[in-house]
Amino acid sequence: QRCHWFIFLSHFKMEAGTEATLLAETLGRIIREDASHPYCDVATPVFIDSETLFDLKRLRPTVRKSDNLVVLLTPQVLTRPWCLVEIVEAMLNDQSVVPVEVQRPGAAFKYPQESFYDDLRAGRVLDDQGMAILLQEKI
């Protein structure tokens, strides 16, 4: 059975909102124009949460209803609790996670070392509100 969306586009809006919108529009057009693509008949084959999701309780089910999670890698994306929720949900459900580097002068994504994950687990990366979201989501 086919999912609702071919791609769920995960991004930090402040760093990659424009890129996410352009990518969603371009990929959506390419998919719809390819008659052999299994999602060519779907009006919106690419889900972008900042444009379509109005209830955060629907975030995890929406990730599950997507074939692929594409994560736009920008400097602070891994410090955004809802982006982490999306990544964890996809991993828990054995979905493809596709990292895409957004390249812009002075704003390169740095692949984290193990110390980043240690700090994240210890509560030294996210603020109290961000940690509360992860606890609420049981992550």
Image: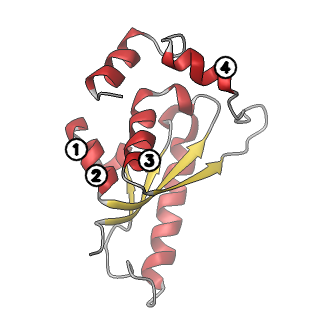
Q: Which amino acid does label 2 sit on?
A: Thr
How far from the left and from the top, in percent, is residue 34?
48, 86
From this view, report whether residue 19 is shown above or below residue 4: above
Pick the residue in front: 17 or 69.
69
Q: What residue type is labelled 4?
A: Ser
Callout 3–callout 1 Cβ contact below 8 Å: no
Q: How far apart are marks 2 and 4 (CA)?
A: 31 Å
Q: Position of residue 22 (x, y in %)?
A: 53, 57
The crowding category of the residue bearing disc 4, from other C-alpha atoms within 10 Å (few below 14, some 14 to 19, many at least 20), is few
Secondary structure under badge 2? helix
- Residue type, numbered disc 3: Met
- The residues bearing labels 3 and 4 have C-alpha atoms spaced at a distance of 21 Å
Which one is closest to the eye, mark 2 or mark 4? 4
Q: Quadrant of residue 68?
A: bottom left
N-term-proximal mark, 2 vs 4: 2
| Badge 1 vs badge 2, beta-carbon distance below 8 Å | yes
Q: Which residue is drawn at 30% across and 67% down?
A: 3
Q: Distance between the residues labelled 4 and 1?
A: 32 Å
The relative height of residue 133 versus residue 102 in the rendered view (above or below) is: above
- Work out whether mark 4 precedes mark 1 in sequence or the reverse, and give the earlier one: 1
Residue 115: mark: 4
Query: Residue 9's spot in the image, x, y percent?
Result: 46, 52
Quarter of the image that includes the C terminus: top left
- Residue 91's tag is 3
Question: Residues under labels 3 and 1: Cα distance?
Answer: 17 Å
Q: Name the secondary structure under disc 4.
A: helix
Q: Where is residue 40 in the image (x, y as percent from the top left)?
A: 39, 81
Label 1 belongs to which residue?
58
Report the front residue among 61 and 49. 61
